[in-house]
């Protein structure tokens, strides 16, 4: 009996070993396959990581080179811009104030012109290409609170210009520009009528403008432009080379010019003066 039990146990043990071996073999193959896949993925990831590292290094070098180039371009542009700002006085001597609505490339081109006739052609062409009927300029001016007291007169000026009746528009534009320039003064000086004094080098407007390089260029161009515009009337019979002299026209000593370029010149100056208003603010002084 005991011998039989030993034999049965031995047989069962063999069966169990065989079954375990069979089961282990059944599981071993997919595990080996999975492990092989993992190893393959690991190799692929190692290759990818190396490639990614190389790509990142190339990008970093490219960004560094690009940043350096951008800095060089920015420095050159900044230098050019300051050169243009320094030319604002020369531009004004050609009959045009600092153009607040020109982009940088257009401003550079205008600053490189050295004679009045070419400057006139350039600015007139700019308006013909960008605002042929002056509708954008009219809308912009009519929205400006500094011109609220001219809501009747200003549209009539534009109507006259569109009818090519420039000599009708110019005296009114001179009056409007005069008032806008006077209003650059601090509130307690608004009663002044001396535009050249308002814009003088050591005046309060100049002191405010010089706090910013662009505002200073705008102020300088207006002062230079107005020095010519407000020049004294020439003696009767003397040579008159300036088509627009505010005092001569306003006091009946000289007929207003009937040229489109002169009407545009005054509108352009008016737009420039209004841009200076945006940058110069004086506190309202208490009278208590």
Image (cartoon, helix red, strand yellow):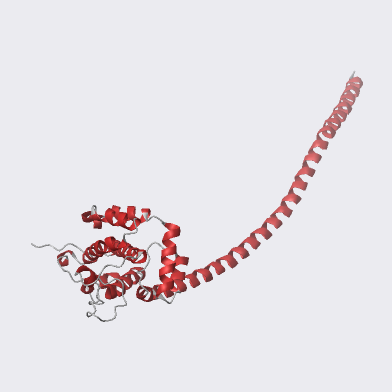
Q: Is residue 94 above or below residue 31?
A: below
Residue 53 left/right relative to 137: right
**Residue 127 x, y percent position in the rendering:** 41, 60
Residue in the picture at 81% in, 40% down: 33
- Tally the marks: 0
Image quarter (top left, top right, bottom left or bottom right) of the N terminus: top right
Q: Is residue 168 above or below residue 194?
A: above
Residue in the picture at 65% in, 62% down: 58
Residue 99 left/right relative to 188: right
Q: Nearer the viewer, residue 105 or 179?
A: 179
Q: Nearer the viewer, residue 216 or 96?
A: 96
**Residue 78 x, y percent position in the rendering:** 46, 71
Residue in the picture at 40% in, 69% down: 120
Res 196 visible: yes
Quarter holding residue 122: bottom left
Taking the view exactly as shown, the residue that stands out farthest to the left is 288
Residue in the picture at 80% in, 36% down: 30
Image quarter (top left, top right, bottom left or bottom right) of the C terminus: bottom left
**Residue 118 x, y percent position in the rendering:** 44, 72
Q: Nearer the viewer, residue 194 or 120?
A: 120
**Residue 257 x, y percent position in the rendering:** 30, 67
Quarter holding residue 12: top right
Res 210 visible: no
Residue 137 left/right relative to 81: left
Taking the view exactly as shown, the residue that stands out farthest to the top is 1
Quarter holding residue 50: bottom right
């Amino acid at each position: 009996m005991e011998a039989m039990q030993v034999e049965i146990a031995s047989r069962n043990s063999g069966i169990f070993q065989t079954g375990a071996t069979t089961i282990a073999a059944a599981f071993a193959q997919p595990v080996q396959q999975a492990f092989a896949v993992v190893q393959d993925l690991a190799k692929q990831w190692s290759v990818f990581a190396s490639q990614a590292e190389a790509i990142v290094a190339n990008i970093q070098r490219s960004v560094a080179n690009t940043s350096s180039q951008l800095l060089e371009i920015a420095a050159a542009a900044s230098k050019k811009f300051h050169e243009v700002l320094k030319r604002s006085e020369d531009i004004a001597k050609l009959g045009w104030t600092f153009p607040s609505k020109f982009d940088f490339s257009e401003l550079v081109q205008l600053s490189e012109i050295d004679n009045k006739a070419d400057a006139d052609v350039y600015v007139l062409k700019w308006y013909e290409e960008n605002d042929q009927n002056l509708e954008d300029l009219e809308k912009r001016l009519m929205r400006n609170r500094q011109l609220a007291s001219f809501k009747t007169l200003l549209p009539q000026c534009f109507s006259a210009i569109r009818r090519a009746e420039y000599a009708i528009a110019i005296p009114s534009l001179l009056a409007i520009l005069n008032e806008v320039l006077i209003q650059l003064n601090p509130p307690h000086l608004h009663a002044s009528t001396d535009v050249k004094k308002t814009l003088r080098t050591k005046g309060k407007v100049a002191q405010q403008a010089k706090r910013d390089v662009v505002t200073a260029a705008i102020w300088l161009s207006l002062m230079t432009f107005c020095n010519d515009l407000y020049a004294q009337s020439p003696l009767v019979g003397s040579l008159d080379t300036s088509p627009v002299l505010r005092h001569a026209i306003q006091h009946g000593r000289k007929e207003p010019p009937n040229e489109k370029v002169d009407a545009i010149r005054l509108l352009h100056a008016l737009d420039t003066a209004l841009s200076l208003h945006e940058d110069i603010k004086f506190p309202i002084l208490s009278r208590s």
